Amino acid sequence: MKNFFKIIFTITLIFFSVFSIGNTADEKIKIGLLVPMTGENKNLGDLIIKSTRMAVKDINSNKLEIYPKNSASNPKQVLKSAAEFKKLGIKIVIGPVFYENLSYLEELEDIIFISLTNKTLNLPKNVISSGINATSQLKTIKKFLESQDTKKTIFLTPKLNYETEIKKAIQKSKIKISKHYIYDTEPTKLTAQIEKITNYKIRKQNLEDEIRRVENSDLIDKEKQLEKLNKKYTIGKVNFDSVIISDFDESLKSVITSLLYTDVSPKKKFIITFNQWFDDSLLNEETIQPIYYPSINKKNLNNFQNKFKKEFDIYPNYLSLLSYDLVGLIYYLTLNNEIMDINKLFKKENFFKGKIGIFEIKDSKINHQLNFYKIDNKELKKIF
């Protein structure tokens, strides 16, 4: 553990030094940038281009060159633009942004693509996912659960297109899950499923039976007991002490609301979800608080957003921050190595401290060390 922190400390120093000292070596570091420059995602591409331009300015090295090309959010256009990178002798590319655009990239085996997707399954051999993936998030959640000495955790995943990704992440993170439920996002079906998961009907019946028993009894304090019972919604415990919900936005709120309906309160059970990117709407939903989730460092994100706004008079999104860090990551990896060996560099175990947090690199995979946050009483609090 001491060696690990020594490595991180050293890398942190290198990171800050490379962002202030130019490198005098002759060899250019050519980085391709594959983002949407036309179509409905054009604004996203523009933000990413601006963030990489800001990174190059901050690194301040005459070695570094960025070559943006249009992905048009289309796999065939991605392949065409990538082939142009090959002609330019570019060996490493940031992008594409979306998982759906990776289809044909294995045809260009001499180029490494660092995609901004957070999906990690069925990637072409020359594609590295750099997004905040499920494994990184579950490792952080695991750390929190262990600190709270929880005994039984259930997992709720919507019936969408990332079920397999979640199941694989559970295995890789080695988080202990009592049971994993896949639920339907249609409200009526969702409520019925949550009722079943929480044994709501049995617990509701237990309350009704107890009320009848007391009503028909000769207890001295019958009225007092009935008063207490009528304030309850159910009687009986649920078979878990924490819930992980891999959902977002209104669908996430629907799941937590269904738990409330079945008398499972966030004040009595840990309600944990995936990275919400500091969704402000959750702050106003006091009835479903407290909510816990892993995320990148909020302070670093705010600092980056303010700097970006000052530079370009527009606020960036989180993919802009990730793109900014990826430029620094590539530069760091090539400081003492040839750009031709970039493929080997991503196979080695490396750690890199960026604005988004610590990148863990090994076996051509990138994971992230994240922080953990709590929303309670309409306030965001950092746990670790």
Image: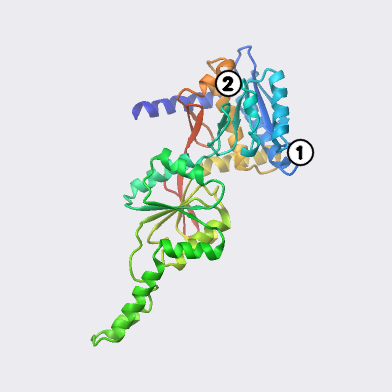
Say if residue 68 shows up in the picture: no
Q: Secondary structure at mark 2?
A: loop
Q: Nearer the viewer, mark 2 or mark 1?
A: 1
Residue 179, how many percent across, how many down? Answer: 39, 52
Residue 38 disc label: 1
**Which residue is identified by label 2?**
21
Could you give the CA–CA distance between mark 2 and mark 1, rounded to whole angstroms? 35 Å
Q: Is residue 38 left or right of residue 120?
A: right
Q: Quadrant of residue 282?
A: bottom right
Q: At which x and y percent is residue 164?
A: 50, 44
Q: Residues within 10 Å of mark 2 (few under 14, many from 20)?
A: few
Disc 2 marks which amino acid?
A: Ile
Number of numbered discs visible in the structure rendering: 2
- Confirm or deny contact between disc 2 and disc 1 (CB under 8 A): no
The answer to whether residue 220 is above or below residue 21 is below
- At x 56%, y 33%, the residue is 123
Q: Quadrant of residue 50?
A: top right
Name the quadrant containing residue 113. top right
Q: Looking at the image, which residue sits at the far top?
A: 26
The location of residue 289, given as percent across then percent down, is 46, 60
Name the amino acid type tagged 1: Thr
In the displayed structure, 224 sits above or below 307; it is below
